[in-house]
Image (cartoon, rainbow, N blue to C red):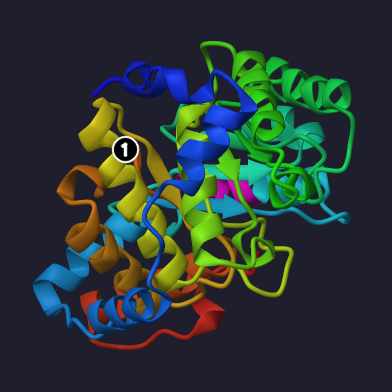
């Protein structure tokens, strides 16, 4: 499936601010009641034992194990990397997580910790989480992270510019960041959906990010009150499905923030399956941005295997 930085079939809509605005405001309006009702309905689907074991392993393999704190130390990041590679040291059949996600100055440490494994190193950049910096500063942030070995860059959009209707500015910034990623790093574009106010804005941001070359679109930083929800993730899944149908380009989705339990994660997997389809049920196309989710997935996995609920003392504290 192609992952080109532009979508040729829609190239003309980004020719100017007016054409981009016309396209984004011409997208179908979102019915909030219908969207939330569908998300709630899909969340009631039950997953039985055999399928549940498969789904838990799939969810583990989709986790971007994350630490984004001012108090992060090299030791903490190394421990996180070890855990990402072997989430349950007592059971080597447990899949590795998709990635570890850290600040740019910790990329080299994380890279060393996961060396020789399938685990990627993702780094937040572009003045995360607020994104309030000059473009040159943001691009330097990205280039530093890529030079240190980051496989993936999680950037934040300029929400102020987006909410002011300066869509071309946001588009051009994403394009510039994508270019700074080079050929070695995939780009996840964070919208901070909790600050976009409306579902219509989330739909517009999704299309804007994909038009600009995002490899993933991501709900949130995890640093605001409202982060990933079933409804906003469903809306973004619809967007990537429709974008691929129109352009042939597949884009991933990453809900982040607030997903803490196995029950939550399985609800999101149902959303993926029923909305975008099985092509997205892979960690190349769907991720969970989380710190505490992995521990609950491991406890539930142990319960399925042994019939006993081990409790939090049997998993490492991140």
Left or right, residue 94 beside residue 73: left
Task: Give residue 102's position: percent from left, percent from top.
Answer: 69, 43
Nearer the observer, 241 or 99? 241
Res. 95 visible in picture: no
Relative height, residue 315 to residue 193 (above, below) = below
- Circle 1 packing at 10 Å, graded few (<14), some (14-19), many (20+), is many
Q: Residue at x 35, y 16 (%)?
A: 8
Q: Residue at x 65, y 37 (%)?
A: 167
Left or right, residue 210 beside residue 243: right
Relative height, residue 187 to residue 28 (above, below) = above
Task: Give residue 252's position: percent from left, percent from top.
Answer: 38, 41
Relative height, residue 140 to residue 266 (above, below) = above
Nearer the observer, 163 or 256? 163
Q: Residue at x 10, y 71 (%)?
A: 50
- Residue for badge 1: 243
Q: Quadrant of the N terminus?
A: top left
Res. 246 visible in picture: yes
Which picture quadrant has residue 169? Answer: top right
Q: Quadrant of the C terminus?
A: bottom right
Q: Is residue 13 magenta?
A: no
Count of number-bearing discs: 1
Task: Give residue 239's position: percent from left, percent from top.
Answer: 36, 48
Say which element carries label 1.
helix
- Residue farthest to the top, as pictured: 183
Which secondary structure class fits the magenta region best?
A: helix
Q: Residue at x 28, y 65 (%)?
A: 271
Nearer the observer, 181 or 20? 20
Please state the extent of the stretch shown in magenta in the rendering. 80-86
Left or right, residue 165 beside residue 114: right
Which picture quadrant has residue 37? Answer: bottom left
Nearer the observer, 252 or 243? 243
Task: Give residue 21's position: percent from left, percent from top.
Answer: 57, 38
């Amino acid at each position: 499936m192609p992952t080109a930085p532009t979508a040729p079939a829609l190239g003309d809509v980004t020719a100017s601010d007016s054409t981009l605005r016309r396209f984004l405001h011409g997208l179908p309006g979102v019915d909030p009641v219908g969207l939330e009702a569908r998300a709630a309905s899909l969340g009631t689907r039950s997953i039985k034992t055999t399928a549940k074991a498969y789904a838990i392993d799939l969810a583990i393999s989709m986790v971007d194990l994350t630490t984004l704190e001012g108090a992060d130390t090299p030791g903490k990041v190394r421990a996180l990397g070890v855990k990402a590679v072997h989430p349950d040291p007592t059971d080597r059949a447990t899949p590795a997580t998709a990635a570890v996600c850290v600040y740019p100055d910790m990329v080299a440490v994380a890279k060393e910790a996961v060396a020789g494994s399938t685990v990627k190193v993702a780094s937040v950049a572009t003045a995360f989480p607020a994104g309030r910096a000059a473009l040159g500063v943001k691009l330097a942030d990205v280039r530093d992270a890529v030079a240190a070995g980051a496989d993936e860059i999680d950037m934040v959009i300029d929400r102020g510019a987006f909410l002011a209707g300066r869509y071309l500015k946001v588009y051009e910034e994403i394009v510039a960041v994508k270019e700074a990623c080079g050929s070695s790093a995939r780009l996840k574009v964070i919208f901070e959906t909790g600050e976009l106010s409306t579902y219509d804005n989330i739909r517009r941001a999704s299309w804007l990010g994909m038009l600009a070359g995002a490899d993933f679109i991501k709900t949130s930083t995890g640093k605001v009150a409202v982060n990933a929800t079933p409804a906003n993730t469903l809306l973004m899944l619809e967007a990537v499905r429709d974008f691929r149908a129109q352009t042939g380009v597949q884009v991933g989705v990453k809900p982040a923030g607030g997903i803490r339990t196995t029950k939550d994660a399985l609800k999101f997997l149902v959303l993926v399956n029923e909305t975008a389809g099985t092509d997205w049920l892979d960690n190349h196309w769907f991720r969970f941005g989380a710190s505490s989710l992995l521990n609950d997935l491991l406890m539930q996995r142990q319960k399925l295997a042994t019939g006993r609920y081990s409790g939090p003392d049997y998993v490492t504290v991140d």
